Image (tube, rainbow, N blue to C red):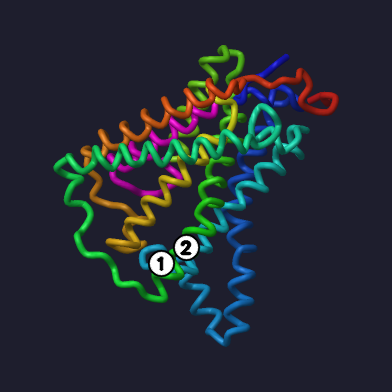
Amino acid sequence: MRLPYHLIHLGGRPGWWRGLLGLIASVLTVFACASVFALAPFMIWYAATGQPVGDRLGELGDLSDPTPAALAYLNLILASSIPVTMLMTWALHGLRPGWLNSILGRMRWGYFLVCLGLSVLALIITLAVSIVLPEQAGSVSGSVNEWTPTLRDFVLVVLLLTPLQAAGEEYLFRGYLLQVFGGWSWKLGEKTSAAIAIAVTSLLFAFAHGAQDLPIFFDRFAFGVVAGTLVVITGGLEAGIAMHVLNNFLAFGLALAFSDMASALNPSGGTWWNLPVTLTQSLTYLVLASYAAHRMGLTRRTESDVLAAPRAAG
């Protein structure tokens, strides 16, 4: 049976409990275990440079006034979702970890690079639209922040670790969890199970960002819906990762240039004027990435009938 991306778990070991166990284990591993293990390099660095280890470690969890180290720490935690979800895919479902990448069982790098270019185009169009909206035109101040060693360190962290952070969130929400919820609802039909998986994972993605104003929550939910839809119709994570990376580059870049990192990590005062901007970016990119996938002849289903080792009972 050739399967779409969100039903790939049907090709692995049977048992609904595997998805539940994987969901719980993934969340606990990423947000509990990884947060502990990610402290190690910072402890070593602080000790080696003679800094007060206890004080510096306390700063890592303070996102109300983040330091470059705090941003790096957060990014490392979220990036751990990549190996964690791959481990769950292999250990619980008996599937090669590559099936998280796409229905080819690997990353389609050519399509990913195309999507990076398309995401830049979508962001340019989005910026053009935002300029003419009353609540958006004055959202960026005219003065550029002074270049300092702290700003330099923030830029390095964003350039080096933000792609891993964005990819980690995609592997967790649009990868493993999308396949879990798709596998649970497959009896309702392929299209219905896809809609359920996209909606649920988008809600979880929005809630995972913590307390937020309703317009900001909707913005993140809409982002999740578009990214999830792209996964289903293109058969892989490439388009969603590209959009997520460029979106975060823009958000962090504007914050570092005109504001501060705290405002990017803890947005407040959301306005419904963000809705036209969000829809412009999301729908433009959705159309462009879908068209590119069609032109490149990408398939939405696995090419092989067998994804895993012989299916085990239970």
Say if the magenta span includes residue 213: yes
Question: Where does the N terminus fall, quadrant-wise?
Answer: top right
* Identity, as a three-letter code, of the amino acid under mark 2: Leu
Nearest the viewer among 257 and 172 is: 257
Measured as percent of width and height from the top left, residue 180 is found at: 61, 30
Q: What residue appears at the point 32 percent right and 63 percent down from the top-left corner?
A: 260
Tag 2 and tag 1, C-beta contact below 8 Å: yes
Q: What residue appears at the point 68 percent right and 26 percent down from the top-left corner?
A: 9
Measured as percent of width and height from the top left, residue 195 is found at: 48, 21
* The label number, if any, that marks residue 71 in the structure image: 2
Measured as percent of width and height from the top left, residue 294 is found at: 53, 20
> Taking the image as drawn, is residue 50 in sight?
yes
| Left or right side of 13 for 125 | left
Q: CA distance from mark 2 to mark 1?
A: 7 Å
Measured as percent of width and height from the top left, residue 160 is found at: 53, 59
> Taking the image as drawn, is residue 229 in sight?
no
Span shown in magenta: 206-232
Nearest the viewer among 109 and 275 is: 109
* Identity, as a three-letter code, of the amino acid under mark 1: Pro
Per the image, label 2 sits on a secondary structure element best described as helix
Q: Is residue 194 above or below residue 177?
A: above
Q: What residue appears at the point 21 percent right and 52 percent down from the top-left corner?
A: 139
Question: Where does the C terminus fall, quadrant-wise?
Answer: top right
- Mark sitting earlier along the chain (2/1): 1
| Left or right side of 170 for 209 | left
The residue lying furthest to the right in this view is 310
Q: Is residue 311 above or below residue 121?
A: above
Residue designated by label 1: 66
| Left or right side of 223 for 233 | right
Nearest the viewer among 167 and 289 is: 289
Q: Tell me the quarter of the picture where residue 121 sits.
A: top left
Q: Tell me the quarter of the picture where residue 130 sits.
A: top left
